Amino acid sequence: MKKFILTVIVLLFAGLQIADAQKKWNEIDFPAINNFEMPEVEILELDNGIKFYLVEDRELPLINLNVRVRTGSFLEPDSKIGLASMTGTVMRTGGSEMYPADDLNELLENRAARMETGIGMTSGSASMNVLKEDFEELLPVFIDLMQNPLFPEDKIELAKTQSKSAISRRNDDQAPIASREFRKLIYGEGSVYARHTEYETIDNITQEDMVEFHNRSFVGNNMLIGVIGDFEMDEMKSTLRRVFSELPAGETIEIDLPEINYAFENSINFVDKQDVNQSYVLLGHIGGMRDNPDYAKLQVMNQVLSGGFSSRLFQVVRSDMGLAYSVFGSYGSGTFYPGTFTAGVMTASETTAEAIDAIIGQIERLQNEPVSEEELQQTKDQFLNSLVFRYDSRSKILNERLNYDYAGLPEDTFDRLVEEIREVTTEDVMEVAQEYLRPSDVQILVVGNSQEIGDQLSKYGTVNEIDITIPEPADDREVVEGDAEMGREWLERMATAILPNGSFDADLTFEADNIVQTPGGEMSIGIEQTLNFQEERITSIVNAPMGQVTIEIADGQGRMLAGGNEMPMPPQQLQQSKAELYRNYVYLAINKDQLDVEFLGMKELDGEEYAHLRINDELPLEIYLDTETALPAQTEYRQMDPQQGRRISVTVEYGDWQEQSGVLMAYETISYSDGNQVSRTVISSHSVN
């Protein structure tokens, strides 16, 4: 009987759950949300300008300090972009006078504590999160880290290498390219709001620059500090007065940013990225400021247009029309400078223009067609419900208060926003859309494949093609002038030695083993390569331990085939392969009459004298010729290593020359990078077809 009753109860509850599951979302009765008790934030100000915001939180035995510093990359000179970010990084990675990097890391690891520093565009930060029992011991360590960072040269060099590595990868993906170039369109090419690091600006940064930037920024008059955790308020205030009062007051940094003289205009801009099969599109214009009285109305308008799965862009452009992998947008309202109004889409190359038109159509619809009361209420409910999570913990409340005070906004900013959103009407949404959106004057930016897109973009006007080539640092080596006439004579002799039958117009094919030096030892890679120097065509079949890869380069494009799959050749690898073709001694022999060459004299290598030539090109190539055979014994050139962010010296040694069908080839070549051997290639045969 007990089992029977239990079974009935289970079935009864299951039936109720099924009944609830069959109800529509607006028919379900939800319990009221529990009220969240807003904690009191106490303020403490010191004579040196530091302002503390304190909140007690007994839930866990932790204490957290969050320092907001009035500084930022807007203070950097154009010649040293990256200074602020690197200063914030090396402050932490380099440690302090009392606790150098290794000692600091060991101390924090043993205490399960965390300390971090960083600097962004309009603010800096420092934070400490520790157990309550370790607070008194680690607080002086934190102060020392903020006030006496070491900035050791090895950590500066590491930060520079990491920054340069990031620069080398910045054109890998469409989204970062689009975001970076769109900011330039809105704010201006040289604007402080659109600047980014280059190899040269990173190289210009010195230890003295970091020390000066830190000393100017991390002073009392520039600090707001939030303190939250398991502590007694009076005891904490006493500790903070005792420890932080010694910090220098310094000079207050004013966040005085340049005005933006934006002119609304329509433009179509394009970045050609050949290794993709879809378009990444951003379009829009200048946005607004956070203190705009219409801010709440704009937020509701933005939610209707692009706020998630129920937004018009998502429902129409993605779901109904099927034009987008993703679609998004926002009307940005900045705190210290105007944001941007942006709408974006990822779409197939062949539907680029159709997707752009669809987005512009939805913006115009927002201006000309009122939203329904149901759509408005649903939008407001979604927005207000999401705002709840901004105040669901004491730490978030404290951070929000810090944010408002730092930005100069009223303490009740959040509460006012909630009330203003509730009061937004359908007429308000249409009015702000008409006032603030300019669909006929948008800057359109497309990052995609020109061959697949075709002429779709011409309908929007003259297409401005944007060059995203990463500038390389200048080569500071001294250039020695040579003898051009003697250079041509030696180059002629080299060409005759390599091509004894004279002109050459055919495919050159060879098979070889390439022995590459890896951290795990030598790795042998089999290669069969066909070169056509006149057509600049390369076909390589590479047999590596992980499988076979075919690489084809023709008409300036490259593709890779492996395992039945095909993908475009990455631009950087394509450029490197073409550069190797142009440095090939057969290519030089064929094109001898078009080359700018100089004789630099005789030079001794390993006890032997060689004729020293220089081919003057974008990347000059130096050649050492055997004085008897006129065949190259060695070539040297400098090239950019993106990962290191600097130029490296590459040396290639040639030996074991053999002739086949009127073409001589070096059957052994050894390559060195900055004096270290990286590969050895041994040719087994070559032929001319």
Image (cartoon, helix red, strand yellow):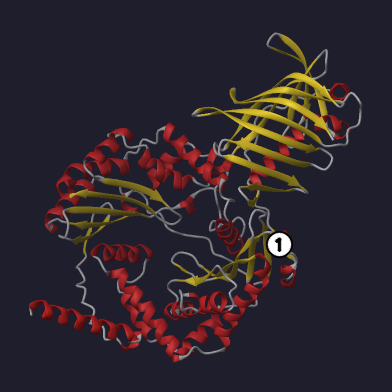
Q: Is residue 608 among the parts visible in the rendering?
A: yes
In this rendering, would 498 be left or right of 414?
Answer: right
Closer to the camera in the image, 392 or 540: 540
The x, y position of residue 329, in whole percent, is 52, 71
Task: Provide the secondary structure element on which disc 1 rests.
Answer: helix
The residue at the point 14 percent across, 47 percent down is: 133
Q: In this view, does 245 lie to the left or right of 347?
A: left
Q: Is residue 49 left or right of residue 179?
A: left
Residue 643 versus residue 182: which sits nearer the camera? 643
Query: Looking at the picture, how far across and down is residue 196, in whole percent?
Result: 55, 51
Looking at this view, name the residue that lies furthest to the top.
607
Residue at left offset 60%, top offset 55%:
190
The residue sitting at the right extreme is: 502
Q: How crowded is mark 1: few (under 14 residues within 10 Å), some or many (20 or more)?
A: some
Depicted 600 relative to depicted 328: above or below: above
Residue, disc 1: 452
Residue type at the position of mark 1 = Glu
Q: Is residue 654 above or below residue 571?
A: above
Q: Residue at coordinates 33% horizontally, 35% vertically from top-left?
A: 101
Quadrant for the C terminus, please.
top right
Viewer-proximal residue among 509 and 353 = 509
- Give coordinates of residue 341: x percent, y percent: 54, 71
Q: Quadrant of residue 325?
A: bottom right
Query: The N terminus lies in which quarter of the figure?
Result: bottom left
Q: Position of residue 405 (x, y in %)?
A: 33, 65
Q: Exactly how many numbered labels are in the figure?
A: 1
Of 474 and 516, nearer the camera is 516
Any part of residue 218 in sight: no
